[in-house]
């Protein structure tokens, strides 16, 4: 390599080694085989900063899991459909097309949207976006009598409830599994999924006054992230548990900072590292909204309704009402 570095014809074709490494890493993340665990040996590039050349490779013996969910996604961003309002015509319901009815601002719908993306089902499950502030009458009359999102139209039936729908998609559609095989992780999965509603309520109710309950809820997640050490996610490996919590952390982080001047990451390094890892997953990144927009929507739709309402038991659904 040293002799090659002296060759002018070769030097004229060279690229910045750091740039090349980033390109390879990005392309590997997109095209890596799904749901396989590799025993490949990893190497760290040692770069001579002054000469901008690679001077050696340092072996990294860490075992690496190629996470299917982290690799899932597309190099081209999906074109999202416009929201359908009260004046819109319904799609051709029960025509054999599988449809996921969502709202772009609803965290419950976002859960199922992420699961659909992680399974690589963008071509098999069509998104139908509903304008919740101007929702069409046909949605309640012809699609889902509960008149909320998300719902899934599949095999001439309509299913609802976000946690159930995530499991339904994982079970009934092809693609990498989003649930663990390990019995201990299976048990912990159910525990964390069951806790998710309690977590959301604790944070939401804290917006009305003291944030002690919210802090305890975030501490619960911090401790939960310490149970397995084979990755930065709740079960070590990426799973439906991470999908269940991510849309709410996405909203609670900027909301509490704005309303309560509280940074949920302070004193919770595992939670901070977990969300950084989540942001690297393309299947989730495709569903993100502008945090400023989210805070304003929640403050407008949720804060006023919740603070003035005595029906506090329904507060979490105000995200999507």
Image (spheres, rainbow, N blue to C red):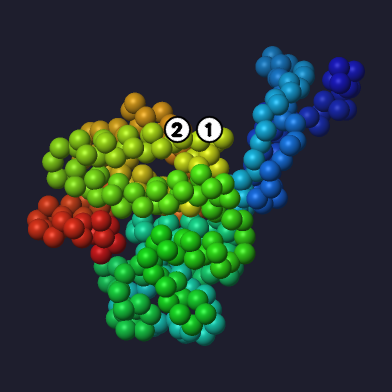
**Going 40% across and 47% down the picture, which residue do you hit?**
192
Q: How many neighbours does mark 1 have within 10 angstroms: few (below 14), some (14-19), or many (20 or more)?
A: few
Give the side of residue 239 with respect to residue 86, left or right: right
Q: How many neighbours does mark 2 have within 10 angstroms: few (below 14), some (14-19), or many (20 or more)?
A: some
* Picture coordinates of residue 270, whole percent (x, y): 43, 31
SS category of the residue bearing label 2: loop
Q: Is residue 184 above or below residue 131?
A: above
Give the side of residue 312 with respect to residue 263, left or right: left
* Picture coordinates of residue 99, whole percent (x, y): 48, 73
Mark carried by residue 226 = 2
**Going 47% across and 41% down the picture, which residue do you hit?**
234
Of residues 73 and 155, which is closer to you in this image? 155
Looking at the image, which residue sits at the far top? Answer: 50
Spatial distance from mark 1 to mark 2, Cα to Cα? 7 Å
In the rendered image, which quarter is residue 321 located in? Answer: bottom left
In the rendered image, which quarter is residue 43 located in? Answer: top right
Q: Is residue 46 visible?
A: yes
SS category of the residue bearing label 1: loop
Quadrant assignment for the N terminus: top right
Q: Is residue 54 visible?
A: no
- The residue that label 1 is drawn on is 229
Looking at the image, which residue sits at the far front? Answer: 183
């Amino acid at each position: 390599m040293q002799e090659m570095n002296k060759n002018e014809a070769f030097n004229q074709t060279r690229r910045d080694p750091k740039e090349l490494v980033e390109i390879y890493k990005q392309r590997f993340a997109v095209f890596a085989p799904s749901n396989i665990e590799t025993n490949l040996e990893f190497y760290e590039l040692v770069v001579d900063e002054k000469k901008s050349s690679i001077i050696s490779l340092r072996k990294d013996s860490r075992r690496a899991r190629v996470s299917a969910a982290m690799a899932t996604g597309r190099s081209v961003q999906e074109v999202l459909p416009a929201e359908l309002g009260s004046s819109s015509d319904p799609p051709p319901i029960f025509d054999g097309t599988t449809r996921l009815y969502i709202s772009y601002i609803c965290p419950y719908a976002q859960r199922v949207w992420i699961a659909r993306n992680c399974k690589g089902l963008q071509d098999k499950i069509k998104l139908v976006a509903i304008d919740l502030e101007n929702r069409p009458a046909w949605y309640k009359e012809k699609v889902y009598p509960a008149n909320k999102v998300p719902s899934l139209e599949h095999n001439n039936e309509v299913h609802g409830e976000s946690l159930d729908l995530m499991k339904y998609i994982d079970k009934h559609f092809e693609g990498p599994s989003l649930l663990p095989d390990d019995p201990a992780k299976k048990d912990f999965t159910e525990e964390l999924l069951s806790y998710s509603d309690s977590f959301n309520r604790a944070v939401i109710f804290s917006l009305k006054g003291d944030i002690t309950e919210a802090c305890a809820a975030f501490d619960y997640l911090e401790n939960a992230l310490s149970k397995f050490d084979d990755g930065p996610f709740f079960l070590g490996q990426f799973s439906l548990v991470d999908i269940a919590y991510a849309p709410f952390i996405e909203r609670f982080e900027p909301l509490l900072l704005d309303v309560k001047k509280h940074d949920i990451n302070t004193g919770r390094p595992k939670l901070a590292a977990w969300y950084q890892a989540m942001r690297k997953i393309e299947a989730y990144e495709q569903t993100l909204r502008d945090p400023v927009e989210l805070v304003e929507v929640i403050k407008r739709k949720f804060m006023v309704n919740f603070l003035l309402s005595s029906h506090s038991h329904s507060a979490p659904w105000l995200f999507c009402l």
